[in-house]
Each structure stands twice: as C-alpha cells, then as structure tokens.
Amino acid sequence: MRYIDERTGLEVCDSALDPLCGIRCDSPSVARALDSYILSASGWRNIFVSSKDEEDPSCTVGDEDMVITAHIAKVLYDSLGMKTPSILLAVDARPTGRILAYITMRVLCALGAKVSYLFISAAPETMAYSHCGFDAFCYISASHNPIGHNGFKFGSEGGVYERSISDAMATRLRESVGRDDVVDVARSLSAVACIDDIDAVMAQYPGQKAMALEHYRRFVLDTAGVDESFHACCGIVGELNGSARSLSIDKDFLKSIGCRTHFVNDTPGRVVHAIVPEGENLIPCRDELARCHAQDPSFILGYCPDNDGDRGNFVYVRQSDGQCEILQAQEVFALVVAIELADLSRRGVSDLAVAVNCPTSERIDAIASVFGAKVFRAEVGEANVVNLASQLRESGHVVHVLGEGSNGGNITAPAKVRDPLNSIMSVLKLFADPGLFSYAVEKLTGRRPDAEPSIEGLIDAMPHYTTTGAFSTLAKMHVKHTCWARLKNEYETLLVRQWPGMHLEDEGIVSYEVHQTEGTKEVVGLGEAFRSPAAKGGLKVVFLQNDGTHAGYMWLRPSGTESVLRVLVDLKGDRQALHDRLLSWQRSLIEEADSALD
C-alpha cells in the first residue's frame, strides 16, 4: 500500500515495494563505500544522494548505501540485545531520508522490533518523545551538513549514545559490511519484512505523531520551568529553511503563549539557502524580521534552525535604533547562559555549574563567575557535554544549562539536546519577568539598568570577546595527513619554537599552557602523554596574562562530522586585529605541521 503524508503530500513509503530487490552491487564496492562514512559519537554520516554531489537535493540513494543502511538497522537491533525492542524512528526533511527510513523500518520489523514512526520530525521532538517507553531511537539526519548528506543518530531517553556504545556499534558495522555475503544479508533482511507489519507501523503513524507533538509541547514548558499560564507578548519570525521544524510545534506553541508569529520558508524539504544557520545564512531571517518590525514593532526576535531543528541561531531588533542584527552562535549561547544563571542565582540556588565543549568562548567563564557558577569543559560532541553534566550532578553541582557554545544554541535540563524553542523561552523570560532583566544587568555591570528589558540591553551588559565564527571559511582546514597524533606532535614542536618570535608580551600575553580534551576530561599539559594514541580530541593553547588569568586561546580539533580540521581563536575584549593575527598563526602552524609529515 502506498502511504502519503497528509500534511506535506510527500510519499512516506509503499509497503508492497522492496527497495533492495533490484540492487546491483558487490561486497567489495560496499566495503569501499563504507570507507567514506564518518562514524562518530555525533552521528554516522555520508553523502547518501546517488550522484555524490553534496548539494544535490534529489531523493535517490546508491545501491551500496542502501545495503549499508540495512546493516546499520541490524547493528542497532543487535546492540539492544532484545527480541522485540521498541524503537522510535524519525527523519529530518532531507529527500534521501525517506528511503533510508523505509529500509531501516523494513529491517527492524523483519528482525522482530516494534517500530514507531514519526516521519519528518524535529530532533528535539523525537528525543523528547523517546522518553515515553522506547528502548531506543534512530534518527536519520545530517544536521547542519549540505542537503545531499545524511546520517544516523542512535540513543535512548532523550540523548544520543555515549562514545563507548557508539564505537562498539561502529566496530560491529565494519565487521558486518566486511563480510563476503554483505549484499545477500541485506537483501534477505529486507525481503522477509512482512507487509502486514509495515502496514501496522503506518496505521499507527498519525497517532504516534500527535502524541509526540503533545508530549514535546509539555516538555518545552517543563524545561523552561514554567506552566500553562506563561505569557510573553512578543513578535517572533521563524525562517525555517525547509527544516523538520516546519512539521513540529513551533507555530502553535508560540501562539499559545501569547507571541505574534510570522513564518517563512516553512515547506519541509524546500531548502532555500545553505543549511548551517550562521553568518550570511541568517540574512533572510534578518531581512524578514526588519520587514515585520517596520509593520509591527512587537516583532523583536527571529530564528533559523538547521535541517533537523536542534540548532537555531537568532537575529534581533536593537531597541536603540530599530536596526536588526545577527547574533553569532557564541553570542546566542552566552545570552541564554546569562539568563538562566541569573534566574537560578536570584532564587538562591548554589553549587551552580555549566558544562560546555572545549571551544566555547571564555566569555561563559566570565559570565558564570558573576553568578557564582563554575565552568567545566568536555570534548566537542553533544554526548560528551551531556555526560559531563551528568557527572557534575552526581558530584553535587546544579547543571541546568549546558551546551556546545561554539555551535550555537543550548541544552536546558532535563533536555539532552539543543533546541531553539528552549533558547527562545529563555529570552522570553526577560520580557515576562522584568525583574530578571534588572537582576542580570546589575550583576553583570554593577549598576541597575535605566531602560526597559531588551535583548540589546543584556548583550551590551555581557563581557565582550572576539571569537572566530564556527562556520567562518577560516575556521576549518583541509589537511593531507590525518594521523592526528603525529600532526599534533609536530604542531606542538612548532608552537614551542615559534612562540618567542610572536612577541605577544606587547599584547599583555606573557606565557601559555596547553589544554587537551577527550570525552568528558580536560587536562593541562603539552605532549602526547596528555592525550590518547588516537589523538582525536581538542587541543587548546591558552594565553596567560601577568596575573595568571586567561587572555584567550587558540584551538584545533579534527571534525567528527566532516573531513576537516576545525580551528578557532577566542580573545577577551574587542581585539579583532590580534584575533586575525593569531588565527593566521594558528593556520600557518597547522599547514607547516602538515607539510612536515610529507
């Protein structure tokens, strides 16, 4: 039976068709295809569109990738160790997701799993609903990557699996795909799927989606720490760029709490600009907010998510002159942290802590110190930050807000994933409770504000830092050598050798120390003794002032989701010239280290 989604008109699946029936590939070609996959705790990703053009918006998937998808589903099933696990399945709005989900559904049903399908669903919606009696979730998405990419995220109870589980599953996948009968196994798994089982999953789909949306609505309120009476009379623009948020609760939820709303580019799958919600990709949202504000001054905030809808960055209207500004990812995170810590501090909550990833701006440390909170750092990767927060709670800390500040957005407990609605709710608290705005500004500046609550007022009150944009063209580098241990060793050798010639004493920087992060651990020390043999974690050169305090840092780490090395510089104050000089040096150190390994 052919199933069409009523809200979008998109075909969900045809239970009578077996997509693996006519595939033509062999085991060596499948094994070679897997070599291009990135298998990390952040997700398993690849360019799935058959053309292998990452900007291709078509829905066709190559035969090798369909075979691998069948084995991915089997690996998930086997990892659970149950005969009839209950698995929640959903996709973002990418065209290739529908066939990948259908193959996954067929294999899971064939193996005996009980599958609940949400079709196109925002990642935070899916993960919130995964609390409701499911043994695991499988979310098919490539997050911020270009439209031709896709991938798989696995987890349970609202969060992705930690690295040890993900790594074990990746090992099992490589073993499975490396077998001579890899194609035959995939064919047979898909072929034995019972049409009645697929039809049963699809019969339950509308009801499952309705329950997921309602649970998610309540979850957002609970996460914000407010009840059904919460009201904030602000105008909000949502430029959704064809993302999965187009089919989530955003429109109805924001209206229900008193907001005026205006949504554009909200047809799921119709991506109109690059997916990463950074820099120039926020211009359409900024311009739409400017237009709405000119017609109705209550419109003061706009947001744009990535394709799975967990990351969302902001544009806002300056109260002083009515101009619209784009907030950088680090600024969005800092804004939310300041609001949430101020709220907790005002209520007398002690032992506050914030868990962040290694390249989060030290602006967070400055903000946290004002409210009596401590900052702890983990390696890049949402699971690492969530696990660090859990460890901190076990040791007696209160960790309410956490996240990967370098990528924008925030995670607010009990959520275990970023969510732009959580960020929006934090900002709306400023307008629903003027006393919170006054408290936050006074703590940050030492003086009471003389103006009404505004986003601009709180941003101006926060300490200023100069930070590389996470998705600046200068923030990533392609290198020839990916033996990270050797590359980092050579980098450190060059760092020590070239440091005296940088003459940074003139900038108030007298020395440095090296911080290295892996998993949930951050250690201080230069050299391979302070990192694992794989050396895939973050390496940060922290700049020290005369009094031992930090002036900033420069950082590098191999990406877990793309074949690049990510780099960043963060400096206290408005110091663009020094930032540019240090970023240029950082890149030259990496280039020289890479060349030295030839």
Image (cartoon, rainbow, N blue to C red):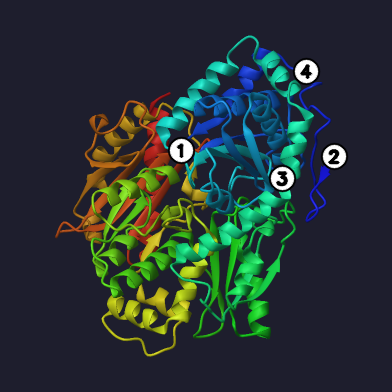
Can you say whether 420 is above or below 5 in the image?
A: below
Location of mark 1 (residue): 161
- Closer to the chain start, of discs 1 and 3, is 1
Local crowd size for mark 3, using a 10 Å CA cut-off: few (<14), some (14–19), many (≥20): some
Residue at image position (34%, 48%) is: 390
Q: Is residue 255 visible?
A: yes
Q: Secondary structure at mark 3?
A: helix
Location of mark 4 (residue): 24
Local crowd size for mark 2, using a 10 Å CA cut-off: few (<14), some (14–19), many (≥20): few
| Residue 245 rendering spot, x and y as whole percentages | 64, 57
- Report if the CB atoms under discs 4 and 3 are less than 8 Å apart: no
For discs 1 and 2, the disc positioned in front in the rendered view: 2
Q: Give 350 or 132, whichever is nearer the viewer.
A: 132
What kind of residue is marked 4? Answer: Arg
Location of mark 3 (residue): 204
For discs 4 and 3, the disc positioned in front in the rendered view: 3
Q: Secondary structure at mark 4?
A: loop
Q: Give 3 or 58, whichever is nearer the viewer.
A: 3
- Closer to the chain start, of discs 4 and 2, is 2
| Residue 280 rendering spot, x and y as whole percentages | 60, 61
Residue at image position (47%, 77%) is: 455
Location of mark 2 (residue): 2
Label 4, label 1: how far apart the Cα atoms are: 33 Å
Can you say whether 573 is above or below 124 in the image?
A: below
Q: Considering the image in quadrants, where does the C terminus appear? A: top left
For discs 4 and 2, the disc positioned in front in the rendered view: 2
Q: Secondary structure at mark 2?
A: strand
Local crowd size for mark 4, using a 10 Å CA cut-off: few (<14), some (14–19), many (≥20): few
